[in-house]
Amino acid sequence: MIYGVPVSSKGELARVGPFLRLEWTHGKPLSHEALLDEKRAYGLMDAMGHPLIAPAELDPPGVAHLTPTQRIALWADLMEVCEQFLLAGLRRKVGPDGDVAAAYREWHKAHMMEHDRAMQHMLEELERRSGRDAR
């Protein structure tokens, strides 16, 4: 099984969300080169190993048909899922006896420091560029 999706012993493609995964054959993980060869054989990569564009039927549906309220609800659901992924990753990082709340506070602090650095850089660039254009 790959992420809870059964895969036959022949190494068939398994659908995981909108993605296709091919990682196992005869119950054993494929080597990196074998995985690339299999992906090329199924038309998922070109001869140079670059991923091909996914077929249109794998594209996620658009939101044009949704009302503004439905779009906001969809966005809120997406944020909830993102938070759950973050917490699951932190839970995995700290282990079963670890403090997830403390790990979240540490992650948030580091994330905000990076955000502040990015904002500072953007402001410096804006000032630099506007000063040069004003002359």
Image: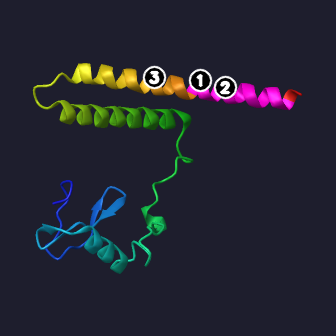
Q: Which quadrant holds residue 23?
A: bottom left
Residue type beneath disc 3 = Met
Residue on which the image places disc 1: 120
| Image quarter of the N terminus | bottom left
Query: Residue placed at 42% from the left, 62% from the top?
Result: 58
Image: 25 above or below 91? below
Q: Which residues are magenta?
A: 119-133
Residue type beneath disc 2 = Glu
Q: Residues within 10 Å of mark 2 (few under 14, many from 20)?
A: few
- Where residue 96 sits in the image (x, y, percent)? 11, 30
Residue on which the image places disc 3: 113
- Where residue 63 sits in the image (x, y, percent)? 52, 46
Q: Are marks 3 and 1 in contact (CB under 8 Å)?
A: no
Disc 3 to disc 1, C-alpha distance:
10 Å
| Image quarter of the C terminus | top right
Using residue 31 as the reference point, say whether residue 131 is left or right of it.
right
Disc 2 to disc 3, C-alpha distance:
16 Å
Q: Nearer the viewer, residue 60 or 66?
A: 60
Residue type beneath disc 1 = Gln
Mark sitting earlier along the chain (3/1): 3
For the view shown, which residue lies furthest in the right direction?
135
Image: 95 above or below 12? above
Q: Which color scheme is applied?
A: rainbow
Residue on which the image places disc 2: 124
